Image (cartoon, rainbow, N blue to C red):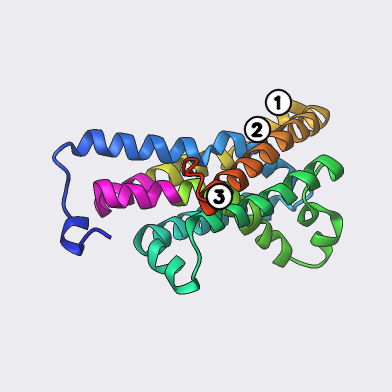
Amino acid sequence: MTSGLDLLAIPDDFAAALARSTIALFVVIDPLGAVPLYLALTGKMEHARKRALPKTIIITAASLLFAFALAGNQIFAIFGITLASFMIAGGVLLFIVAVELLTRGGWRFGDASAATEGGGQEEEAGIVPLAFPLLAGPGAITAVIISLESAGLIVTTISILAAAGATYVILRFAGQIYRVLGRRGSLIVTRVFAVFVAAIAVQYVVQGALEVFGGGGGGA
């Protein structure tokens, strides 16, 4: 791990390092790709809760990324796990989400029973699967750990804030996207996207398995 002094240092190519880190993180997070899943999760939520949910999602995802950037290796060491096994677990969870979307057209927290039971499940929907593992998933966690090691804490912090801010704006205006698509169009897009979510999940599992079994098949 880079020393505390090095972590606070500003790289000579600050602008380039910041651009690389921010773009890489934004691409891995893929907030535009998360819009169909977000719409599926929030389709039957009350308007007030739907407006508040992006904030919950972003705070949770950003907090996870900060925590893993600063202490990811230590967290894995404490629990005796590796990034590869973390990728496999995240991939399995994400695959379950994809199956729910394909078979039900939405995630279980978005149904009517969740609304009658109060906001607990709706708040949980902001954490699983959106904040984690879709946004702050194995790929994003790997990206921030690499950014911290290569560019330092300042660049990594700004990158996380920038990516989180852009993601918040996209999710905040997801309702407008829904109105453009319509109910049927949104359902079609959601189920098509579910196939890509499943593919991403399988890729996480494959990459993790290659690392576990010594294939060296590329990180996230």
- Mark sitting on residue 176: 2
Horizontally, is 213 left or right of 40 in the view? Answer: left
Question: Which residue type carries mark 1?
Answer: Val
Of tags 3 and 2, which is closer to the observer?
Answer: 3
The residue located at (78%, 52%) in the rendering is 110
> In this picture, which residue range is highlighted in magenta?
142-161
Disc on the earlier residue, 3 or 1? 1
Q: Using the numbered discs, state the Cα–Cα distance from disc 3 to disc 1 in whole angstroms.
A: 38 Å
Measured along the vertical axis of the image, is residue 13 above or below residue 53?
above
Disc 3 target residue: 208
x and y percentages locating residue 202 in the rendered image: 66, 42
The residue located at (62%, 47%) in the rendering is 205
x and y percentages locating residue 11 in the rendered image: 17, 44
Identity of the residue furthest to the front in this view:
214
Q: Is residue 207 magenta?
A: no
Identify the secondary structure beneath mark 3: helix
